[in-house]
Image: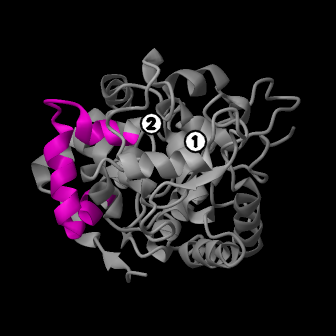
């Protein structure tokens, strides 16, 4: 497993770029890597410790926690709304949205992190920030880059199931649609390719890609962008009329390591999800040169991924007096 690669130099931004970011996203100026330096200075190490413990019994939990942060930020911004259970105040939970239902996981680990953080710093750290910190710890512990997580988010008091259904990118969508969903939250093509690289670890159920294996787009044939040898393996793992929940490694070459093999796989037509392979196999797409760069230069991928995670974490956070600091990540305070 690769060692952690610091990417803190990414935070040294030209002044004009910083000013532009502040103008475009004024509330983001309140996020800071030192937000908890006096109120909960050990929060990062607490989060990392709980994630590390969870990895001992669940090798894919890091990927699952990273995905939670991703799916949170694309709906109402990074406000921890994905963590809210259906109940008195929440009539339609994001957990039951199509992209998350029987798929999103790691909520128990988030609970464990919250408990540990509350024991040390009660009423201080938001669940939204816990997701951001857990994602960074998960990537670093898998051998990926490290970065200074900007914190200071507050937790939302409502869920948006319809927003989750509409806004979260899905494996079945075209590159054009997914690009539009990224653009809608202020993320560009480089962010799209870099963040897709999180599929270098974790698993996917057959139901998220079996449409590629036998009757792609109603052609009666498999997806032509799938390697024939990889196709044979996937057809064996996911037979027609078989279980749609069987797990498959997103990166067959290094399933639990965070590296650039995901992009090397795309060059060899071994992207598991349709949305993965389209990054390289969509003719004329601006994503192709980025995939080629990341496939040959892991450092470039790590640096871009760290910056894109910061960019994504800056999507419409609640700050100041907005929202609340939930005492239980699964429900709004007082419910």
Question: Are the residues at dot 1 and dot 2 in contact (C-beta closer than 8 Å)?
Answer: yes
- Residue 334 image point, x, y percent: 85, 40
The 10 Å Cα crowd at callout 2, few under 14, some 14 to 19, many 20 or more, is: many
Please give the residue where the numbered disc 1 appears in the rendered image. Answer: 79
* Residue 281 lies within the magenta run: yes
Marker disc for residue 206: none
- Residue found 40% across the figure and 52% down from its top: 229
Q: Answer with left or right where residue 278 lies relative to residue 16.
A: right
- Residue found 48% across the figure and 57% down from its top: 151
Q: Answer with left or right where residue 241 lies relative to residue 257.
A: right
Local SS, label 1: loop
The residue positioned farthest toward the top in the image shown = 218
- Residue found 36% across the figure and 41% down from its top: 226
* Residue range corresponding to the magenta coloring: 276-305
Please give the residue where the numbered disc 2 appears in the rendered image. Answer: 316
Q: Is residue 260 visible?
A: yes
Q: Nearer the viewer, residue 175 or 217?
A: 217
Which quarter of the figure has residue 23? Answer: top left
Compared with 177, 114 (above or below) is: below
- Residue 198 image point, x, y percent: 42, 55
């Amino acid at each position: 497993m690769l060692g952690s690669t610091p990417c803190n130099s990414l935070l040294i931004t030209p002044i004009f770029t910083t000013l532009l970011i502040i103008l475009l996203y004024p509330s983001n100026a309140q996020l800071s890597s030192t937000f908890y330096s006096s109120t909960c200075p050990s929060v990062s190490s607490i989060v990392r410790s709980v994630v590390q413990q969870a990895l001992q019994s669940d090798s894919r939990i890091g990927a699952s926690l990273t995905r939670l942060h991703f799916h949170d930020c694309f709906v109402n911004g990074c406000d921890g709304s994905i963590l809210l259970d259906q109940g008195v105040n929440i009539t339609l939970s994001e957990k039951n949205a199509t992209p998350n239902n029987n798929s999103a996981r790691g909520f128990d680990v988030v609970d464990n992190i919250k408990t540990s953080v509350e024991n040390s710093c009660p009423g201080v750290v938001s669940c939204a920030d816990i997701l951001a910190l857990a994602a960074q710890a998960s990537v670093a512990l898998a051998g990926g880059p490290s970065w200074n997580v900007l914190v200071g988010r507050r937790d939302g008091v409502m869920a948006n199931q319809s927003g989750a259904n509409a806004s979260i990118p899905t494996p079945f969508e075209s590159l054009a649609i997914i690009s539009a969903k990224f653009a809608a939250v202020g993320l560009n093509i480089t962010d799209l390719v870099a963040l897709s690289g999180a599929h270098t670890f974790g698993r996917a159920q057959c139901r998220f890609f079996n449409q590629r294996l036998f009757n792609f787009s109603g052609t009666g044939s498999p997806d032509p962008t799938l390697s024939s040898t990889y196709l044979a393996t996937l057809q064996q793992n996911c037979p027609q009329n078989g279980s749609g929940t069987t797990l498959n490694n997103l990166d067959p070459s290094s399933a639990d390591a965070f590296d650039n093999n995901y992009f090397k796989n795309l060059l060899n037509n071994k992207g598991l999800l349709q949305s993965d392979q389209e990054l390289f196999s969509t003719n004329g797409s601006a994503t192709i040169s980025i995939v080629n760069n990341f496939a040959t230069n892991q450092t470039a991928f790590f640096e871009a991924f760290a910056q894109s995670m910061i960019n994504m974490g800056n999507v419409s956070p609640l700050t100041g007096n907005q929202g609340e600091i939930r005492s239980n990540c699964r429900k709004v305070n007082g419910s």
